[in-house]
């Protein structure tokens, strides 16, 4: 066990080390404050602010969409369906399968939906694909915490005359808020780091765009394009971009921890 | 017993799958007294109590036949509003389960749901019922702290205040002191003695001495059957049934 842990930790450090060692020299203020200038991929000036903004917008949009659909699903599975419900089991298995489906499939599926709706490669298309990708993960994560809510707590709410809806939104959601927050941030993290699902759906642009119907750049694709050039200095920027992405995810998981302890204080054990 | 009947149970049967947990129970629970449901563990005491506020509905695969009349209304009538029935009854469970919110919010939870929204009205309600549950002095300076930060004995009194705040007529208690230390238990028992003039209290207990101390009326349930019921004195001093005698003497448990 110690050996396995050591190997895993070593590999992890190696990955982070590579990103830091190769990325730091190329990291500059320009990287995070400027969009690519002409000839960026041939060593020209500028940065990847377009991709940082695009990725944040995309992941935030997809997280919000998944949350709006995902939280009610997880609550429905646990509170409206009974513990032994066959339907709930079928839905859980389906969600588990969906968690394992490769993200390129969601990309392709999102693309098909976009064609059907007549939307071109855009932030909206990306949000659709990434929402589909992260929703199963988010639902299952929330499902696991809602499942742990003691039945007596629900009964306590019923016993003062609260109906099911009030119980769910005033008691169950409050009790599971820390878990819901971490599930949403888990989804956000998965969404921001995925390249395959956005490949067809968001397109790519060198401009900073805030429009739902315009293509946006994303960090994983920026890394992909930069690594794909033959120029060593541009490749180095790919590592710098990876470093930025890693920092974003680090900030995210730290804030998740902070929020969990902040909102967890009312939890009943 | 001159008191009128508050809860009347007629031929109540409860099945859990193929297993019959309550067999043809018929009792009349008097108003404004403490009724203790006694009997060994797993004999259907809790099930009987949970029929009264229809929490039994939340259990999978349960089937109930017969009638439970509260103030003359059949609560299992499909036309009945379950939330209105439950509002009539406060519940104390074996282990206190405060809601995941502050001490203040726990008490205000019920009244808010039933339409009291103004802060000054809620303040009055919260203070009144925390006092009634004899916990006000301990919490008045930290009303907005999480309820889970209280000791378990305080939590149980908070749960009592929460139940009282919806102005019920009946208090249902399921072994309310079984998780508490002796001092906290006594505190709850004293509350019951104060409250019994205003509320009908039905408590499940398997502590015979507790039933003896508190109850005016006793219901003895054994293996899902109602063996005997009557005024506390009669049951404890002069039980009619052999099995009641044995239980009270401690020959069977």
Image: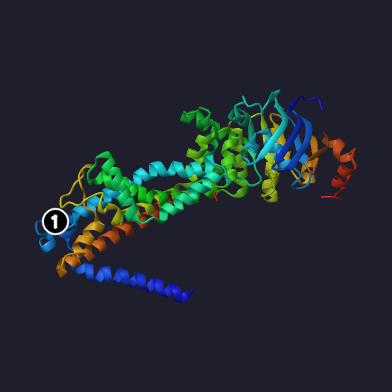
Label 1 marks a residue whose chain is A
Locate residue A45: give its quadrant.
bottom left
Q: Nearer the viewer, residue B133 or B10?
A: B10
Label 1 secondary element: loop
The answer to whether residue A251 is above or below residue B57 is below
Asked if residue B237 lies left or right of residue A44, the reply is: right
Residue A176 % position (x, y): 48, 47
Asked if residue A30 lies left or right of residue A99, the reply is: left
Q: Is residue A146 visible?
A: no
Residue A70 % position (x, y): 42, 44
Q: Nearer the viewer, residue A50 or A130?
A: A130
Q: Is residue A156 visible?
A: yes
Asked if residue A36 lies left or right of residue B155, the reply is: left
The answer to whether residue A246 is above or below residue A157 is below
How many numbered markers are drawn?
A: 1
Q: Which residue is mark 1?
A: A36
Residue B36 % position (x, y): 76, 38
Residue B201 % position (x, y): 71, 34
Q: How is the image coloured?
A: rainbow
Asked if residue B175 lies left or right of residue A13, the reply is: right
Q: Nearer the viewer, residue B237 or B120?
A: B237
> Badge 1: few (under 14), some or many (20 or more) residues near its Cα, within 10 Å?
many
Q: Quadrant of the N terminus of chain B?
A: top right
């Amino acid at each position: 066990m110690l050996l396995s842990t050591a190997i895993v930790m070593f590999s992890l450090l190696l990955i982070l080390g590579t990103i830091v060692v190769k990325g730091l020299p190329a990291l500059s203020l320009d990287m995070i404050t400027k969009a690519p200038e002409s000839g960026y991929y041939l060593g020209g000036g500028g940065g990847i602010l377009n991709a940082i903004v695009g990725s944040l917008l995309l992941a935030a949009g997809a997280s919000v969409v998944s949350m709006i659909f995902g939280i009610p699903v997880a609550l429905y599975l646990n509170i409206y369906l009974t513990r032994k419900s066959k339907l709930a089991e079928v839905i859980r298995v389906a969600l588990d399968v969906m968690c394992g489906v490769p993200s390129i499939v969601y990309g392709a599926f999102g693309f098909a939906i976009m064609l059907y709706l007549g939307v071109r490669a855009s932030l909206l298309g990306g949000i659709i694909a990434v929402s589909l990708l992260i929703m199963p993960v988010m639902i299952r994560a929330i499902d696991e915490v809602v499942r742990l809510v003691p039945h007596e707590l629900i009964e306590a709410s019923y016993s003062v005359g609260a109906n099911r809806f009030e119980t769910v939104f005033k008691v169950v959601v409050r009790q599971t808020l820390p878990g819901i927050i971490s599930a949403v941030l888990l989804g956000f993290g998965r969404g921001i780091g995925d390249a395959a699902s956005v490949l067809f759906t968001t397109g790519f642009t060198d401009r900073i765009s805030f429009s739902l119907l315009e293509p946006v750049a994303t960090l994983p694709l920026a890394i992909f394009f930069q690594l794909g050039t033959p120029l060593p200095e541009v490749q180095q920027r790919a590592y710098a971009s990876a470093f930025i992405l890693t920092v974003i995810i680090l900030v995210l998981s730290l804030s998740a921890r902070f929020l969990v302890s902040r909102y967890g204080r009312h939890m009943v054990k | 017993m001159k008191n009128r009947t508050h809860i009347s149970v007629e031929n109540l049967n409860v099945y859990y799958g193929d297993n019959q947990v309550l067999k043809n129970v018929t009792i009349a629970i008097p108003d404004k007294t403490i009724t203790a449901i006694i009997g060994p563990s797993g004999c259907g005491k809790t099930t009987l109590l949970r029929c009264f506020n229809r929490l039994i509905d939340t259990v999978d695969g349960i089937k109930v036949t017969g009638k439970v009349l509260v103030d003359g209304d059949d609560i299992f009538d499909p036309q009945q509003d379950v939330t209105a029935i439950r509002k009539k009854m406060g519940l104390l469970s074996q282990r206190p389960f405060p809601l995941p919110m502050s001490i203040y919010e726990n008490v205000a939870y019920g009244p808010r749901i039933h339409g009291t929204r103004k802060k000054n009205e809620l303040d009055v309600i919260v203070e009144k019922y925390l006092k009634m549950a004899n916990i006000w002095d301990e919490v008045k300076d930290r009303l907005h702290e999480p309820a889970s930060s209280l000791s378990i004995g305080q939590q149980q009194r908070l749960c009592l205040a929460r139940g009282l705040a919806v102005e019920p007529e009946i208090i249902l208690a399921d072994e309310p002191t079984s998780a508490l230390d002796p001092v906290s238990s006594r505190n709850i028992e004293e509350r019951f003695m104060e409250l019994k003039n205003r509320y009908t209290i039905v408590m499940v207990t398997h502590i015979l001495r507790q039933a003896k101390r508190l109850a005016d009326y006793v219901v003895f349930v054994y293996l899902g059957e109602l063996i005997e019921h009557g005024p506390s004195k009669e049951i404890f001093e002069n039980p009619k049934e052999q099995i009641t005698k044995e239980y009270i003497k401690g020959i069977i448990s």
